[in-house]
Amino acid sequence: MGTLLESINSPADVKRLSLFELAELAGEIREFLIQTLSKTGGHLGPNLGVVELTLALHAVFSTPEDKILFDVSHQAYIHKILTGRRERFETIRQPGGLNGFMLRTESEHDCYGAGHAGTALSAALGMAVARDLAGGHEHVIAVAGDAAFTNGVTFEAMNNIASQTKRMIVVLNDNQWSIDRNVGAVARYFHRIVANERYQHLHDKATHLVERFGGKTAVKVMRRAEEAAKSMLWPSILFEEFGLDYFGPIDGHNTPLLVETFKFLKTLEHPVLLHVLTQKGRGFQPALDGQKKFHGLGPYDPETGQTPDGSATYAEVFGKTLADLATKDERIVAITAAMPNGTGLDHFRPHHPKRYFDVGIAEEHAVVFAAGMATRGYRPVCAIYSTFLQRAFDPVVHDVCLQKLPVLFAMDRAGLSGDDGPTHHGLFDIAYLRGIPEIVLMSPKDEDELADMLKTAFEIPGPSAIRYPRGAVAGVQRKPEPQAIPVGKAEVLADGSDVAILGLGPMISLARELAATLARDGYSAALINPRFIKPIDREMIEHYASRVAAFVTFEDHVKMGGFGSAVVEALDEMGLAVPVVRIGWPDRFIEHGKVDELRARYGLSVEAAYAQVLPLLAGRRRATLVAS
């Protein structure tokens, strides 16, 4: 006899289940998630926390007609399972498989693609207004975690909802975590609502009514009890000041309560917010014990939750080196936008707690906040992933670079981010930073050079940025102390007279392989570690332009506007006509997959570079033979 889960091939199958069967299905889904993701990795904790919530949404609403948006959408795995993708679920985040986030091209049930926080309410409002203009009747539901409410875009959307649509449902999924525990006034506000004993007592009585009797009448009784509680506890509720009727908080794991509440909310003709309390990692003790670890991780043991021991990462080297430098320089402060673990600042925080600032999911604020500190003599470090720093482009230009303030941007996940896919690849930062005046842009070839660049950044009087990859370091022998690098000077690792090969950052490994391959064919290759993208080492470029038949550039970045483009521009400005073979990502969004496989597919390889540069070298050799 098959399981209930095996009978679910569409949301229509969910609607046929009784409340008792929905509870049974929730247990099966949790076990399915734990077992499947133990092989593939993924966002286990967030999805274990929204099983009942997602089941209730699909039991009451009807996608794809009704629109359900998940903020960030890393917690949409159950949604994918219930909307016809269960049999492919073992391919999630694998090459050619399901994306780890909602993706419009993957299913008609994915009404909006996302991967960054704070977008759900704005997008949902856009859909609701479009529905109103077209005379439609579908429901629009935005599910956003409490961490998303630390993001300014969420509040910008709330400022407009009541004045622009009459019907929209916001579900606040409150689990007190983003990746790290949530911080700030918004988190404290939610906690006060949940923790107040008088409010909780009245709410619990209303909940029992719903469980016992069900139906709209009981939900209305619950609503009246909550209104009475709110009038006793606060003169106003934040969300109602924005024009959203507030319901909750309710138990996000109580399926009957969720179903009856959503049935009631469907009938309302004004925007509402339902506050739902969930437990991140529910049903798997290792995930409850290790909230940060199980937010998103690789394969693990489904019994113990243990993961293979990993080697040191660039993030760890960054965090530890910064902590050491801050011990010697009291001006150094560290700022993160809700990512202390991912950026490595967990290694900084214990040593310098008063100089560590987590501002929540608020990248724009992080950068302007850093600018303000810099005006008072501090040396702020904004540790923000490359893909998330995109959100703060204007403050980088206007507040930091225009004022020549000494803020350092430490951009982890620069380059391909593999399994996370196009929303998380850091493939555009060179292009969006290189054209800004005043900024110094660096890329280390290994962890030792990352430490040196941190040291260098604090000697630069203006803004700077360091881009480095996700994952394991190169494994080189570290120097006892970081050493400052002359700004704008490349490192020539090997001289050569036929071709100059520039490998930016960790791509130096491919440059080295190409040099060795060409050497076997009798060609003399210069191997160069550029170190600086801006200012580029024009003296080095001019020197080799007079000797070699071609330049080859390797970069983990799109070719358009990237480092190779900077080399082409420098040659053109100096009036030097030397071919440049640029190896980088094409002008398209790159899907998720294993890094090596994607590099091979898109020509970021020694073989592709060899095929392009060899005709240039062979042509020069033939010309030399003819001339002689």
Image (cartoon, helix red, strand yellow):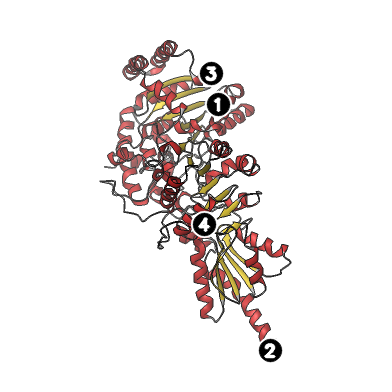
Q: Residue type at mark 4?
A: Ala
Question: Dividing the picture into quarters, in which one does residue 32 lie?
Answer: top left
Query: Does the CB distance between marks 3 and 2 fall below 8 Å?
Result: no
In terms of secondary structure, where does tag 1 sit? helix
Dot 2 or dot 4: first in sequence order is 4
In terms of secondary structure, where does tag 2 sit? loop
**Quadrant placement of the C terminus:** bottom right
Q: Which mark is residue 158?
A: 1
Query: Does the CB distance between marks 3 and 4 fall below 8 Å?
Result: no
Q: In the drawing, does residue 552 fall left or right of residue 90?
A: right
Dot 2 or dot 1: first in sequence order is 1
Q: Which residue is mark 3?
A: 241
**Of marks 3 and 4, the one in the foreground:** 4
Dot 1 or dot 3: first in sequence order is 1
Look at 53% across and 57% down and name the residue there: 443
Query: Does the CB distance between marks 1 and 4 fall below 8 Å?
Result: no
**Of marks 3 and 2, the one in the foreground:** 2
Q: Which residue is mark 2?
A: 628
Q: Which residue is mark 4?
A: 484
Residue 577, x across and y down, in percent: 71, 69
Please say whether residue 132 is visible from this viewpoint. yes
